[in-house]
Amino acid sequence: MIGTASEENAALLARFGAEHVAYGDGPADRVRALAPEGITAAVDCAGTDEAVDTSVELLGGRTAS
């Protein structure tokens, strides 16, 4: 499991068993580095345009309806 969060919340992600990816420029590249075979799902609880765009990019343009 991979999760995005601020540096201040990295330990919280670790408690949930997720590998931390920091916010900022290039999050898709950092996720790809942790999951070179790709990801199978993305859950976006933030709802920002950037977060949605990154999720869609990582899923190869696949979205849920």
Image (cartoon, helix red, strand yellow):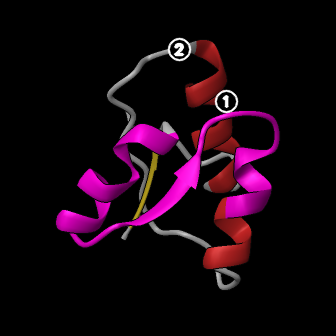
Does 15 lie within the magenta span? yes
Q: CA distance from mark 1 to mark 2?
A: 9 Å
Look at the numbered disc 2 and give the secondary structure of its residue.
loop
Tell me residue 40's x, y (percent): 46, 68
Disc 1 crowd rating (10 Å Cα; few below 14, some 14-19, many 20+) is some
Percent x, y for residue 60? 70, 55
State which tag comes first along the sequence, 1 or 2: 2
Q: Give the residue at the far left of this rendering.
A: 16
Q: Is residue 65 left or right of residue 63?
A: left
Residue span colored magenta: 7-30
The three-letter code of the residue at mark 2 reads Thr
Q: Which residue type does callout 1 highlight?
A: Asp
- For disc 1, the marked residue is 53
Q: Residue at x 43, y 50 (%)?
A: 42
**Mark 2 lies on residue:** 48
Task: Classify residue 44 as left or right of residue 35.
Answer: left
Q: Describe the element under mark 1 as helix, strand or loop.
A: helix
**Residue at the image point whose x is 70% and y is 46% from the top:** 27
Q: Quadrant of residue 30?
A: bottom right
Image quarter in which the C terminus is found = top left
Residue 63 is situated, as x and y percent measured from the top left of the image, at 51, 41
Horizontal and vertical percent for residue 26? 81, 44
